[in-house]
Amino acid sequence: MDDVCEGKDFTFSKQEEKVLELWSQIDAFNTQLALTKDKPEYIFYDGPPFATGLPHYGHILAGTIKDIVTRYQSMTGHHVTRRFGWDCHGLPVENEIDKKLGIKKREDVLKLGIDKYNEECRSIVTRYVSEWESVITRTGRWIDFRNDYKTMDLKFMESVWWVFSQLYAKNLVYKGFKVMPYSTGCKTPLSNFEAGQNYKDVSDPEVFMTFPVVGDLHGASFVAWTTTPWTLPSNLALCINANFTYVKVRNKYSGKVYIVAESRLSAINNPKEKPKEAVVNSSNDVSKNKNAKAKGASGGKTENVLDSFEVMEKFSGASLVGTKYEPLFDYFKELSDTAFRVVADNYVTDDSGTGVVHCAPAFGEDDFRVCIDNKILSKDNLTVAVDDDGCFTEKITDFSGCYIKQADKDIIEAVKAKGRLLKSGAFTHSYPYCWRSDTPLIYRAVPSWFVRVELLKEQLLENNKQTYWVPDFVKDKRFHNWLENARDWAISRSRFWGTPLPLWISEDEKEIVVIDSVAKLEKLSGIKVFDLHRHNIDHITIKSDSGRVLHRVDDVFDCWFESGSMPYAYIHYPFENVELFEKNFPGHFVAEGLDQTRGWFYTLMVLATALFGKPAFRNLICNGLVLAEDGKKMSKSLKNYPSPMEVINDYGADALRLYLINSPVVRAEPLRFKKEGVYGVVRDVFLPWYNAYRFLVQNTKRLEVEGLAPFVPFDQASLLNSSNVLDQWINSATQSLIHFVRQEMDGYRLYTVVPYLLKFLDNLTNIYVRFNRKRLKGRSGEEDCRIALSTLYNVLLLSCKVMAPFTPFFTEVLYQNMRKVCKGSDESIHYCSFPTEEGKRGERIEQSVSRMMTIIDLARNIRERHNKPLKTPLREMVIVHPDADFLDDINGKLKEYVLEELNVRSLVTCNDTLKYASLRAEPEFSVLGKRLGKSMGTVAKEVKAMSQENILAFENAGEVIIANHCLKLTDIKVLRDFKRPDGMTENEVDAAGDGDVLVILDLRPDDSLFEAGAAREIVNRIQKLRKKVALEPTDMVEVYFESLDDDKSVSQRVLHSQESYIRDAIGTQLLPNSLMPVHAVVLGEERFLGIASMSFGITLTRPALMFNKKAILSLFTGDAKSAHSLQTYLLSRDHSKLKSEFQDGNRKKIIDSIDQLPAVEVVLGGHVFLTVGDYNLAGKS
């Protein structure tokens, strides 16, 4: 393996760019597809975005989810075709061209020519394709842009025609006249799910107007209420609720008589009708009017309303049905015989308004239904007095050509001029806006072609049950409710750029031919077809069987119909790929945002159910919305978020990927995007991971530096038999990681993986590497070192393979270096199979090590409380736990790690939990509260009163009956309070526990432990100095100690008694400063005063050659000059090369290159020593 740089010098984004170059060189994605071509298919449907805008975090999030799942499926033995798709038709494209060409009305398009308009649309569809490819590729997503699909391609459009023809053949298509959400900005109706995508709180005018009752003796008027004054010119009826009680009242001040629902009388109370003195002296004073919502609002107070009105009569709503009234305007006087009368329906409520609703059948869904049902008019004679652009037609003579919303004020003034305005004001409510043009929607009656979704409702609900969603509440609540209330789907749009409806129809609409293929159209028309857009087929006519000429209807498909047809159209089914489709439908996986529950997920489900009686997909991940850090929608104009490329360039795509999937957004909840959150992933995940990898590489290189055989990892099977407890533990933990990630990925729960990985990496670096440093550095022998390095190598390799779908770049970087020592490895980590569990997981050892770390944390807490740093050795610790197996592990194979980490001399275990602790029980209120209800108080009292014997019996049995309730281990928390031994103070003995294990530390000072503590202090200063002079762990140095004390006996005693510990800790001898030769190269030195009652200096030098001058002199028969020349020559040589030469020569080397000197054989350890330490040891021996 090649050397690697420090973590702080490792630039993640630059490394990722190198990986992209590698993938390009080896054609990695296509190679992976080729390698898996004979595997079972895994069908993934990629929802097509519009290419008229640039990708944002929402696209990157959904793309990351899709990439992780499809990479995982590929690694687990599937062939996963991934083709990018583009939504090319519909409003987003037309809207751009309308702005570009200044098109305001439908007539403008017809004047320009549909051919020119559509070609303008086609020209911008792929405007940002290269930018999309660049960003998506940079995020690490593997998807085919070369073999993409476009909804404007002839093959795609032909399959859409086939889908429609199948629905038509099943009698699921009809033409209807229906009131629908309508965008005046885009001049087209919208489906119900489109209308729900952009609600805003707006202030609209609210108007109370009167409708005089024809022939009423008292001159009474119905009072109705509306927030859409522009609909008043089209009023044809008033609707009441037959079950309500209505009152006829006289205003005491104006004498006017009104009819309203009794429960809504307060709504028509108008202070302006009172004389001024009546207002002043009225009990309905100013302070009470403070609660009004808005000027003239409809939610007025009910108290004292009878001060203003005299009730003349009460009657049921049913008795008013059929009553005629005087219309506000005379635009529809031709309908007087059937219109301008009272009808009844239960849609009228009494939570607002007056209980009397004005009906304009062309502009309200309920209005239309009620007027048709009550024969106010028929569908055939409905006049829609507003054109496609939202302007009044010539029918409304006084406001002809005026945009409806701008006409509101003039219409209110006209009503006022007629003496029919009771009061007006402003009303704030939530109102739908067009998701594309951001203009307010209206409801407008339009002719449209519909799919009978309501007929499929039960089957849709059943098919939804067959699908698996993450999170499941979106399926069971939001999507289920949407299906439950599904309406027939208007699939036609009176637009230009889209897939045309394949309906050729006679003028009287009696004869219809549905075209299901290009071949059929060519056959029936005799004309060659090369494109299916309107300007290329609208001129084509077909002769019917009766000889009549049929013309195509003008409409095009709603673009949601096209995207819902994607599972069939992207592979040109049924014209191609029949076997591929029919063997693998429904598709295995889809993923998009929460908004698609009413969009793409819905249309996929409707069309698949209608065509095949099946759901379109099996598994679905639904993500939430990515918001700016302030919780607002990300906005280019507000610049309230960093660009994706800025984040990727700073921290890398892998960090962004992990940040996104480790957030609430993968559970369909919103995410407030924070750039520092991405940095947090680098800090908490990638740097510890990289440092563990770097430590491995450094120590494998050290073997070569020391002249040992190059590192070749042992095979995994033999490593599973390692006798080292931490090898056993990390191997088991790695198998648990594999098991967990497989389990969660098979359940499509991506968000659970990162927290588990974080814990795994923390264990790898802070337990395995930290506790095994001596073995990994070779201080326990070469064989043991190679086992430890092989274990670390294997763990890192397996964890890289496990995480490859999540972090494709970083795992590739590590893999490319690690594969150099492994023959026959795959060229890319993404060609590897996903790891499978091998061997049995050691649950006991995993639990024991976990408890060991708890013990270490608890002991550190005790030390901190008493200001006892780890460098201060302690005499004894006691571990209290009832599990004998755990105590055996702690007192056996884990003992050395606990003692060394905590700097304690002895460890005692105890399974008698009552010896050092008293037990008490507390109820788990969060668990029991809902379950026990009113019994909770009684049960809680008895639980708290449990004796120690009862608690122990409960722990053994696993359950207990209290107040007739059976309580389990999860229902009661058993707490162990420390019971200090008699005669001991808190400063002498203290304890800490977590409810499971109890740790007791003997804190009493012990002079016999001073030398061990002092040695730790010396080692600590040496390590800090190494770091200060930027030494790598593998850099060999010699360390010199100089006592600065007058009385040097203290330091001499410490160095002598702790010699072995110090040598093991620093990896070399600690030499007296007096032995430092003059030719030693000093790397760093520092003085330390008052450390553990000592003052001393530490010097670090490069290894220096030392000579046995007597032996060298004998080589030249006492010639001192020649002996000096040899020493000078050896000192001039590179130390590491000289070391290698001696190793190659079996500790001997012939020197024959010094002028005028005879060749001599120099023996390492006889004539020359590579370090002062070696020379010193030789002298002692």
Image (tube, helix red, strand yellow):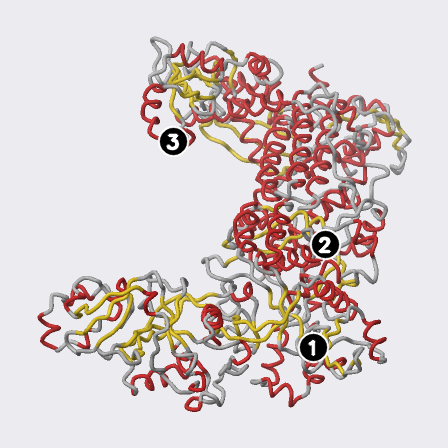
Residue in front for this viewpoint, 778 or 304: 304
Q: Name the residue under label 1.
A: 510
Helix, strand, or loop for circle 2?
helix
Do the residues under discs 1 and 3 have CB atoms within 8 angstroms? no
Quadrant where the image shows the C terminus: top right
Residue in front for this viewpoint, 397 or 1151: 397
Residue at image position (79%, 67%) is 155
What is the CA distance from the residue labelled 2 to the residue labelled 3? Answer: 48 Å
Q: Name the residue under label 2.
A: 612
Helix, strand, or loop for circle 3?
helix
The picture places residue 661, in percent across and down from the top left corner, at 59, 48
The picture places residue 548, in percent across and down from the top left corner, at 77, 83
Camera sees residue 822: yes
The picture places residue 286, in percent across and down from the top left corner, at 15, 67
Q: Which amino acid does label 3 sit on?
A: Gly
Comparing labels 1 and 3, the label whose residue is closer to the camera: 1
Please rate how many residues cluster around mark 2, counting C-alpha atoms within 10 Å: few if below 14, some from 14 to 19, many from 20. Answer: few
Q: Mark 3 points at which residue?
A: 929
Q: What residue type is labelled 2?
A: Phe
Image position of 767 (left or right of 950): right
